[in-house]
Amino acid sequence: CSWPASCPACCCVLFIITVWLIALKNPAEAPPGPHLPLAERVAALAMAGRIFNKTVYIKQAEEAMAFIETNMARRNGRLYARYRKGEAKILGYLDDYASIIWAYLELYQASFKTDYLEKAIVRAVDMINLFGDEFGTAGFFLYGNDAEQLIARPKEVYDNAKPSGNALAAYCLLKLGKITGEQKYLDIVNGMF
């Protein structure tokens, strides 16, 4: 979009940025609301740094991303969903992968460090392989094909207070397709709708 104030998605993100910046300055004053996963905080900080021309926000986003990369991923790159008391557990869900791709894309746009774009591409390929539907139906499954197998693998298609994993995945793949010029990402998004 050309101007954040005219875009509903950007207005939502700017609200998240505002809440997160208040929480950074004084956690006691942060408005109540849903938990904001770390990767979404990274995306919000990187976007805030870009929009408000504040390098300190971008640096904070980069530090938080370094924490995720160091503490919340297996050696083979598989993400974990939570980190608590020095231990990462629970294999990452679609939301986790889509959020980290969004964070990498925002860091790339804020810093123009190609390393972030390359990592977004790697995570996008991982997301497609882990959560994609091998039967060719639209959308991504909630949990990966390497997770414990339940009776059914659900697909979250409705947005709630936050966008669904599929909505965020579509947004990230669309953005990735536009930045890289790779049609395969755009084809996946077109197949979702």
Image (tube, rainbow, N blue to C red):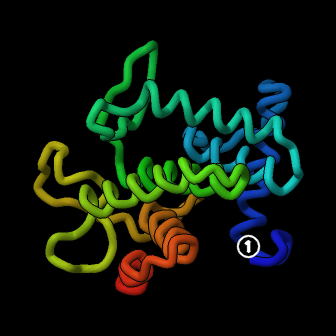
Q: In the image, what residue type sits under mark 1?
A: Pro
**Residue occupying image coordinates x 24% and y 52%:** 144
Q: Nearer the viewer, residue 103 or 93?
A: 103
Q: Work out whether residue 192 can be spotted.
A: no
User: Which residue: 33% across, 60% down?
Assistant: 125
Q: Position of residue 114 (x, y in %)?
A: 57, 53
Circle 1 packing at 10 Å, graded few (<14), some (14-19), many (20+), is few
Asked whether residue 104 is in view, the answer is yes
Taking the image as shown, residue 187 lies to the left or right of residue 52, namely left
Q: Is residue 13 above or below residue 84?
A: below
Q: Quadrant of residue 15?
A: bottom right
Tally of numbered tags: 1
Q: Which residue is mark 1?
A: 8
Rendered view: 171 above or below 106: below
Q: Quadrant of the N terminus?
A: bottom right
User: Would residue 145 be found to the left or right of residue 82 on screen?
Assistant: left
The structure residue drawn at horizontal position 30% and vertical position 63%, both measured from the top left corner, is 128
Residue 87, compared with residue 51, is above or below; it is: above
Q: Image check: 97 left or right of 53?
A: left
